[in-house]
Amino acid sequence: MTAILKWAGGKRSLIQAILSTFPPGYEGRAYHEPFLGGGAVFFAIKPGNGTINDVNPRLTNFYRIVRDSPDALIEAASKHPYNRETYYRLRDRFNEGGLSPVEDAALLLYLNKTGYNGLYRVNSRGRYNVPFGTYKNPTIVNVEDIHAASEALHRVELRCEDFSYLLDAAHEGDIVYLDPPYEPLSKTSNFNAYSPTGFPWSEQVRLSETVHELDARGVLFTLSNSEPVKKLYKGYRVSVVHANRNINTKTTARGPVREIIVTNIKNTKTEQKIPL
């Protein structure tokens, strides 16, 4: 199955490259994903146990409603027509707060499917500020996909906390896939405004320290990021991949970009060890 939300930096186009780093029989291992976002990898493999996590409470509420109340979500989200006036009225309602969990999830789904480029972006005050998106005939509610996602979500534990929870949750032999907000290649290419605080370099460093500890404990990991973080992962295996990225203020700057996949799993098909 595919992810049910559009997401900036989503891994739909890189799923095969990511899964090629996983060991044979990975389906039988516990799986952990601390930066879930749109969950393209999670929904592709539908693990039997493990944890998924995101620090965005509205996103984790959405997945909780998908898991526990899919029909209520479908009913609530199906009420809203696709047009500019409705979009901005519902965006204001979303930012006002005070919504029921089902209504909050329904508005998030609507805004995600009808907003510009599938972005989830908030300003420094935590207000969702993505403009209206122009589409020919967007599918806002995919009933089949929502029910399939609900089934997949029942198999894992859903969390909303700092990624360091992995040090307690992940055990030797488990697989962790990490897809943090990418370190920008330049000041003008920065996009990690999923939360008001963003994801600065100090968080990239702290994440690498967590990954080193997981590796020392025998936890298997694969991590996606941009090339500037390579220096934080010396000694592990890295492969360079090209991913399609459609988010840029200049349309001419959109298209394939170089990214890296870092792993401590020894069966990678194409690898280049980062020099110590």
Image (cartoon, helix red, strand yellow):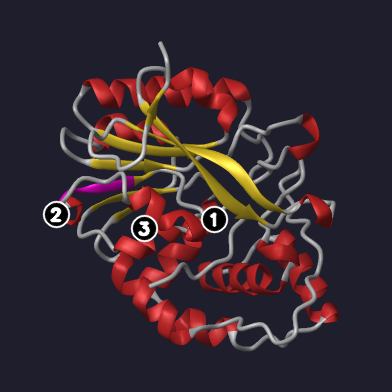
Which badge, 2 or 1, comes first in the chain's sequence? 1
Counting other residues with Cα less than 10 Å from the Cα at mark 1, is it few (<14), some (14-19), or many (20 or more)? many
Residue 68 seen in the current view: no
Residue 182's disc is none
- Crowding around mark 3 (Cα neighbors within 10 Å: few <14, some 14 to 19, many 20+) is many
**Highlighted range, magenta:** 28-32
The answer to whether the residues at label 1 and label 3 have Cβ atoms under 8 Å apart is no
The amino acid beneath tag 3 is Phe
Left or right of residue 170, residue 135 in this image: right
Residue placed at 52% from the left, 73% from the top? 102
**Residue at 41% over, 85% down:** 144
According to the image, label 2 marks what residue? 28
Q: Amino acid at mark 1?
A: Gly
Q: Tell me the quadrant of the picture where the N terminus can be found.
A: bottom left
- Residue contact at pointers 2 and 1, CB within 8 angstroms: no
31 in the magenta segment: yes
Label 2 SS: helix
Q: Earlier in the sequence, mark 3 or mark 2?
A: 2
Closer to the camera in the image, 187 or 23: 23
In reply to whether residue 96 is colored magenta, the answer given is no
Q: CA distance from mark 1 to mark 3?
A: 11 Å
The alpha-carbon separation of the residues under discs 2 and 1 comes to: 25 Å
> Where residue 174 sits: x, y (%)?
20, 41
Above/below status of 261 relative to 206 = below
Residue sitting at x 42%, y 15%: 275
Q: Residue 7: x and y, percent?
A: 59, 59
Left or right: 183, with 179 as reference point: right
Q: Which residue is mark 1?
A: 10
Residue at image mark 3: 42
Q: Position of residue 198 (x, y in %)?
A: 65, 36
Residue at the (40%, 76%) spot, across then down:
69
Q: Residues within 10 Å of mark 2 (few under 14, many from 20)?
A: few
